[in-house]
Image: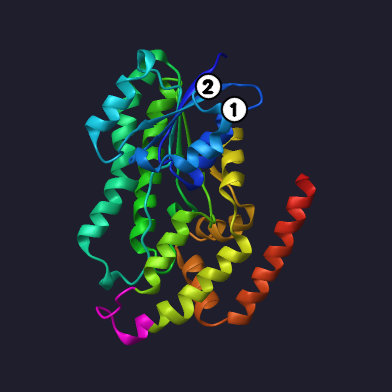
Amino acid sequence: MGTRRVLVTGCSSGIGLAIAVRLAKDELRRFKVVATMRDVEKRGALEIAAGETLSRTLEIRQLDACCESSIRECVNSLPERRVDVLVNNAGMGMIGPLECQSVKDMQDLFNTNFFGLVRLVKEVLPDMKRSQSGHIVVMSSVMGVQGLLFNDVYAASKFAVEGFCESLAVQAMKFNIKMSLVEPGPVVTEFEKKVYEEVQNMDLSCTDEETARIFREIYLPYSRKVFSSLGQTPEEVAEQTLQLIVAKNPPFRHQTNRLYTPLTAMKHADPTGRLPIDAFYKMVFQHDRVFNASLGVMRMLQKRMGKSKA
């Protein structure tokens, strides 16, 4: 197989930037990367990280996943409109009590996280069908498999992504097109930091005092502990995404953090849905010591897995 053209969205920072740079710096030079972002004025960090690959194996282009004409213009600008691999990464986050979030903000989130993916796939899928080849890689989340406290709307958008891809994958297979969902757990990026900075001063006056207390005194400290203990780097996720892209038979779903597998497995273990909901309830509200001890064990396992890879 010759050099494959990879279109990556949301490359101004975080996972998208890391994936674009990792593919561009591939030792075997298997990829020509088209790294896109909504605002090309924010290209500085990507240019620095790309280094000598810039204008060689990596080029930067404007693409707004919320605008069909922007997507079409970007794809039309590519030779023969050829996209061998689409990496859909552009997204936004939202956390907090439901009563404190506007429907407009929820719609904006779905417009990016879900409909952004739909627009991109609609644009590249016909060409992939004609060529009987292609790979659509979608940055999902473990929250596309298992919902999480105060992440109601974000999880809903990722559930929508998972359902869309799971349905489309059967048709894609008929045309020899591969689909892969990458499901990270917590990833320490500027994207995540920004989300948490915004909620520090979030107006909680629209919800009741008990819910506001749970959010501030239980959820936020809990979430910080999880990120500091189990958070991956964007580079780790990028490396695993590269391995998916080069695999002969890539899996449809891939969780980047194996420590989360037992948590998501609970959902499939009990078709009634009681097991994961009860487990998360007890972990958050009743067994703080068990939760802290579990994080300690997971930290130790993570270090051992890191050493074994080295």
Q: Nearer the viewer, mark 2 or mark 1?
A: 2
Q: Which residues are magenta?
A: 202-212
**Marks 2 and 1, how far apart in space?**
20 Å
Residues packed near mark 1 inside 10 Å, few (<14), some (14 to 19) or many (20 plus): few
Residue found 59% across the figure and 58% down from its top: 231
Judging by the rendered image, the residue that carries numbered circle 1 is 246
- Number of numbered callouts drawn: 2
Task: Name the amino acid type tagged 2.
Answer: Arg
Left or right: residue 3 compared with residue 68:
right
**What is the residue that sits farthest to the bottom in this orientation?**
209
Residue found 62% across the figure and 28% down from its top: 26
Q: Is residue 211 magenta?
A: yes
For the stretch drawn in magenta, the main secondary structure is: loop
Quadrant location of the C terminus in the rendered image = top right
Q: Is residue 251 visible?
A: no
- Percent across and percent down for residue 96 are 36, 69
Instruction: State the scheme by which the image is colored.
Output: rainbow
Residue 199 sits in quarter: bottom left
Task: Name the amino acid type tagged 1.
Answer: Val
Residues packed near mark 2 inside 10 Å, few (<14), some (14 to 19) or many (20 plus): few
Judging by the rendered image, the residue that carries numbered circle 2 is 56
